[in-house]
Image (spheres, helix red, strand yellow):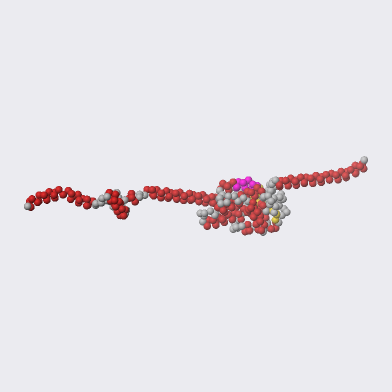
């Protein structure tokens, strides 16, 4: 019996080891299947919400850019505002993604607060989007980044090169909704998008005592190095500064510049509408005055002298007077004499009886 128990003890350990191994393998399989199902359902797309939020700001800048082509703006104003659009998207003095001044390491562009080294994001909107959506080979989280199907990964040593970033930005542009092209955004639209950004920013307190905000990356931990890796302290994210006694987005340079630009373009649009309304009102008033003057102007027949009045026409048009006199003669069948001739003829008629009497009396005396 003792010998049997001695034989059974090693066998039991073997059996227990085999069962434990099978359990671990089964558990790993269950977890893998669960992750695969979650990925299929769209629940593990890393930085999906952050991507949609920043895409909203890209849409605002595109709408501003297209609205600058509206009539009524001088070439100087268009050029100045166009530069501000490029500064927001790509950073100061850059007009495209190739001209962005990429640093040697990813965390120097995207943000870090570790070992006394502090770097912050927020200089350019496109740079922040690439920090959130461009994968790093072998160390980025598995699955999709930002949107379904984005599985591209690049080695970390090529971060400083713009060729990969150009490809990433081209894909991101196609995925971002363009919005209402030609319609400038309003302050209300901007503030709605700002609030959405604020809700997604996570607070943390750095070792230096200053406050920073991490956007994107691991939702469980709050990484302090945004180098594209997925660990407890590292992540594919951006880090923004927080200004004292201000909200969580005031330290983002491109956001503050975009807010100022939205306000300026909105004012310009309101002024353009006001000028158009004023011009339309002036045109309508001029047309009304012209029609009124036309209706109140007297005709040439009304301006001619009254028939038989003998007064000359005020506008000096003798042809009209002659024509009127001739028409009156034809109508009455008699010739109208001038007033002087009419008076002479009346005097002659009044003296006729006396002349006749004189002739009668003169003849007898003569004989």
Q: Quarter of the image containing the N terminus?
A: top right
Residue 146 locus on image (x, y percent): 67, 50
Q: In this orientation, which residue lies closer to the viewer: 89 or 71?
A: 71
Is 194 contained in the magenta span?
yes
Residue 277 locus on image (x, y percent): 48, 49
User: In the rendered view, does 276 fall on the left or right side of 36?
Assistant: left
Is 319 contained in the magenta span?
no
Residue 168 in which image quadrant = bottom right
Residue that appears at 66% across and 56% down: 167
Residue that appears at 29% across and 52% down: 326
Give, as a single range, the part of the protein colored magenta.
193-202
User: In the rendered view, does 261 fall on the left or right side of 237?
Assistant: left
Residue that appears at 72% across and 50% down: 142
Magenta segment's dominant SS is helix
Residue 228 locus on image (x, y percent): 69, 53
Q: In this orientation, which residue lies closer to the viewer: 6 or 364?
A: 364
Q: In this orientation, which residue lies closer to the viewer: 13 or 133?
A: 133
Q: Do we see residue 260 in this rendering?
A: no
Q: Do we see residue 83 in this rendering?
A: yes
Residue that appears at 46% across and 51% down: 279
Residue 210 locus on image (x, y percent): 64, 50
């Amino acid at each position: 019996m003792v010998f049997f128990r001695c034989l059974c003890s090693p066998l039991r350990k073997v059996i227990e080891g085999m069962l434990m191994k099978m359990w671990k393998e089964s558990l790993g399989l269950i977890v893998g299947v669960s992750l695969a199902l979650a990925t299929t359902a769209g629940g593990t797309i890393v930085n999906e919400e952050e991507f949609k939020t920043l895409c909203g700001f890209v849409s605002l800048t595109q709408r501003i850019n297209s609205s600058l082509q509206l009539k009524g703006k001088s070439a100087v104003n268009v050029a100045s505002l166009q530069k501000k659009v490029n500064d927001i998207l790509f950073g100061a003095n850059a007009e495209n993604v190739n001209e962005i001044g990429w640093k040697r390491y990813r965390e120097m562009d995207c943000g870090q607060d570790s070992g006394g080294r502090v770097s912050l994001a927020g200089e350019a909107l496109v740079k922040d989007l690439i920090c959130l959506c461009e994968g790093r080979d072998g160390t980025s989280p598995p699955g999709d980044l930002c949107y379904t199907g984005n599985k591209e990964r690049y080695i970390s040593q090529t971060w400083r090169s713009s060729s990969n970033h150009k490809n990433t930005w081209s894909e991101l542009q196609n995925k971002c909704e363009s919005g209402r092209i030609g319609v400038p955004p309003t302050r209300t639209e901007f503030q709605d998008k700002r609030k959405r950004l604020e809700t997604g920013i996570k607070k943390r307190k750095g070792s230096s005592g200053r406050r920073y905000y991490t956007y994107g990356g691991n939702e469980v931990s709050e990484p302090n190095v945004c180098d594209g890796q997925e660990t407890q302290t590292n992540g594919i994210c951006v880090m923004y500064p927080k200004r004292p006694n201000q909200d969580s987005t005031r330290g983002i340079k491109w956001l503050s510049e975009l807010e100022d630009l939205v306000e300026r373009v909105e004012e310009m649009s309101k002024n353009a509408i006001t000028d158009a309304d004023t011009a339309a009102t002036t045109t309508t008033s001029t047309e009304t005055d012209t029609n009124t003057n036309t209706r109140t102007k007297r005709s040439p027949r009304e301006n001619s002298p009254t028939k038989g009045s003998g007064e000359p026409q005020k506008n000096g048009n003798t042809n009209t007077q002659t024509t009127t006199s001739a028409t009156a003669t034809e109508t009455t069948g008699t010739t109208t004499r001038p007033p002087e001739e009419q008076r002479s003829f009346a005097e002659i008629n009044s003296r006729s009886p006396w002349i006749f009497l004189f002739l009668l009396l003169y003849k007898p005396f003569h004989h």
